[in-house]
Amino acid sequence: MVDLYISKLSKNKNNNSMNNMESYPPVLRHLDQQQHPPPPPNLDPNEEFQEPDPVPIIDLECLQHEKLEEACKNWGLFRLVNHGVPLTLLKELQEVAKELFGLSFEAKEGACSGSPVTYFWGTPALTPSGTALTKSPQNMNWVEGFDVPLSQLSHFNPQLPTLESVRVLLMEYEKHLSRIGIRLFEAMAKNLELNIKRSKEYIAEKSGMVRVYRYPNCPDTNVGLGMEAHTDSSVMSILNQGDEVGGLQLLKHHKWLNVKPIPNTLIVNLGDMMQAISNDRYKSVMHRVSINKHKERISLCYFVFPGEEVVIESSKYKPFTYNEFRSQVQEDIKALGHKVGLPRFHHSQPLLL
Ligand SMILES: O=C(O)CCC(=O)C(=O)O
Ligand SMILES: [Fe+2]
């Protein structure tokens, strides 16, 4: 697949982010770098959005419990407005991340060695030691990113100035996002009538993690994906996808629906832990990321996790901890090439791999 990309990319001379070949791994650099005028805008099928936008909207300032319940049950994903994160912070994060990804591959890789932050190309699935899981090139996602464990940000001192700028912004971002995660989870727990003490354990303080992604543009959108179809293992994930380039798609009624980038909104999707906690009342939504032909896309995803050792109990699943779940996912990816996820822990369901 990597070779295929190279030949496709070589043919395309209009590829804006492809001009900066230093920012790509050496194996992807042998490309024609001749520059041509940019392509006509808006010709990308990825950019087709359903109007009016059907994604449910949740207002964090005046949270309506019924609306939230409906979104969690029927969609597993919603758009968050009035979230209180300053627009300047959202934009700055996008801009500084873009600058960071524009640096050479070696600089990005080197900046993370010996640090809690990991840099990856192709697959964000990491082992606990932080090493990317080896997958066959056919399954490579067309994405690069940084994996940032937020609890370690305050004692991480990057030498690379752009990474330091990202770190400082993320420290601020974390305060907002953990507030949002807690507020939303409390409202969901109330709707689900969860025991208050138990439900507090379900989202661990300081367990959040951010992944910062760049999905480079690629001329052939029929080849590969930015990120293959998956459900998140988190309790919930909160996405800043900027306001320009789409790519996130969710599976709704057996069809992929493009999630429109709208300025100053965040996208929240529920993950496997939330589905288990809610005893399948809420959905861990299946989603993926497509590649844009002409424009690269930057996104930041904040993941809310339960405490690693907290036992998740529900009648549909055997009791399990997030630690056990994560180990099982990693074992399955290594052995089968894909995640099995919740069915592994189901009480009664026969397991179809
Ligand atoms: O970048 C995106 O839009 C989505 C990323 C995602 O699905 C993930 O990190 O799990
Ligand atoms: Fe995801």
Image (cartoon, rainbow, N blue to C red):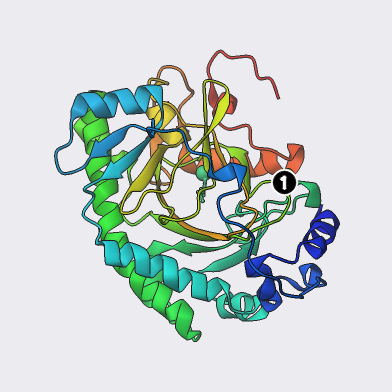
Q: Residues within 10 Å of mark 1 (few under 14, many from 20)?
A: some
Q: Is residue 183 left or right of residue 169?
A: left
Q: Residue furthest left?
A: 62
Image location of residue 70, percent across then percent down: 30, 23
Q: Looking at this view, is 83 or 153 the one in front?
A: 83
Q: Looking at this view, is 270 or 258 the one in front?
A: 258
Tell me if the residue at label 1 has its CB under 8 Å from ligand 1. no
Q: Which quadrant would residue 87 be assigned to in this image?
A: bottom left
Point out the image quarter for the C terminus: top right
Give me the residue at 57% from left, 22% from top: 254
Residue 28 visible in the displayed image: yes
Q: Which quadrant would residue 94 be assigned to in this image?
A: bottom left
Secondary structure under badge 1?
loop
Numbered-mark total = 1
Image location of residue 149, percent across then percent down: 45, 62
Q: Is residue 44 left or right of residue 77?
A: right
Give me the residue at 14% from left, 38% from top: 62
Eyeballing the image, is 35 above or below 49?
Answer: below
Eyeballing the image, is 81 above or below 346?
Answer: below
Image location of residue 45, percent across then percent down: 61, 42
Q: Is residue 147 left or right of residue 187?
A: right
Q: Looking at this view, is 117 or 266 the one in front?
A: 266
Amino acid, disc 1: Gly
The residue at which mark 1 appears reads as 224
Eyeballing the image, is 307 above or below 58?
Answer: below
Image location of residue 9, percent across then percent down: 77, 61
Residue 194 visible in the displayed image: no
